[in-house]
Amino acid sequence: MGKQATLQSYKLATIEDAKFALDNFNIQNEIKASARRGQVEPVLDATRLTVPTCICLDLEDLKCFEAVERQYERWGVIFQNSLAIQPSNPAFPTYSGLIVLMGAPKSGFLEASFLRPVNSVSAFVTSSQRLVLSAYDRDRQLLAQTALPGSNLANSNSPISPNTLLSINVNNIYSVTFCTFDGQFTLDNFRFCL
């Protein structure tokens, strides 16, 4: 079972206070989104959705050290300052598969922008420092934040396990940022829900 910290206000959540559950999104439909350009895939029409639908990005189609920007645009998300890596440092294990996302070339920062508003965003994170996930509306006004309070590297003395699930559930999210000061982090199983 993964750990999850969820917040829907400006107050930062603490890992100790949160009720942890792998999934509380009440999802009835999840789509595994591929980055492969030649693969035939269903077209996502958000105007026709009648049940909550989530898109979980399949990072395994990405090449190691590939800059990730518009590979998932047809699924409704564009990344900035994102690099696909296969971690060689055992302190940054993957949650599933071999590939994760990392903030690069500018370390400690990664942004995802959505082509239409979403209602929740989550990812399994491993970080060398405190990591803040922030959600913004169309006008770049802060909607909510949640944080991993400190490092959660594997094989460290951290009370927080690697690959802790961070999520934000709030209406009309147009972008999110993952930010850590003077540190590195990885994301796995990035998911957003319409």
Image: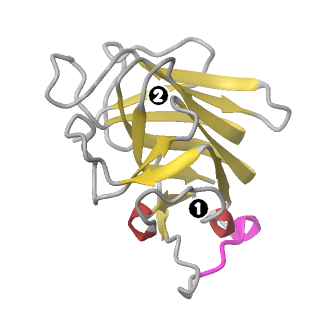
Towards the viewer: 68 or 11: 68
- At x 48%, y 60%, the residue is 57
Residue located at (50% from left, 60% from top): 66
Secondary-structure class at tag 2: strand
- What crowding class fits label 1: few (fewer than 14 Cα within 10 Å), some (14-19), or many (20 or more)? few
Q: Amino acid at mark 1?
A: Val
What amino acid type is highlighted by mark number 2? Answer: Thr
The percent coordinates of residue 116 (x first, y second) are 76, 54
From the viewer's perspective, is 102 left or right of 111? left
Q: Which residue is mark 2?
A: 6
- Front in this rendered view, residue 55 or 91: 91
Residue 22 appears at what percent x and percent y?
A: 32, 42
Taking the magenta stretch, the answer to whether it contains residue 76 is no
Number of the front mark, 1 or 2: 2
Magenta segment includes 45: yes
Q: Is residue 24 visible?
A: no
Question: Quick one: quadrant of the N terminus?
Answer: top left
Query: Is 113 or 142 nearer to us in this picture?
Result: 113
Residue stretch rendered in magenta on the structure? 42-48
The answer to whether residue 193 of the structure is visible from this angle is yes
Image coordinates of residue 7 in percent, x first then y, are: 52, 24
- Local secondary structure at mark 1: loop
Is 91 situated left or right of 70 in this image? left
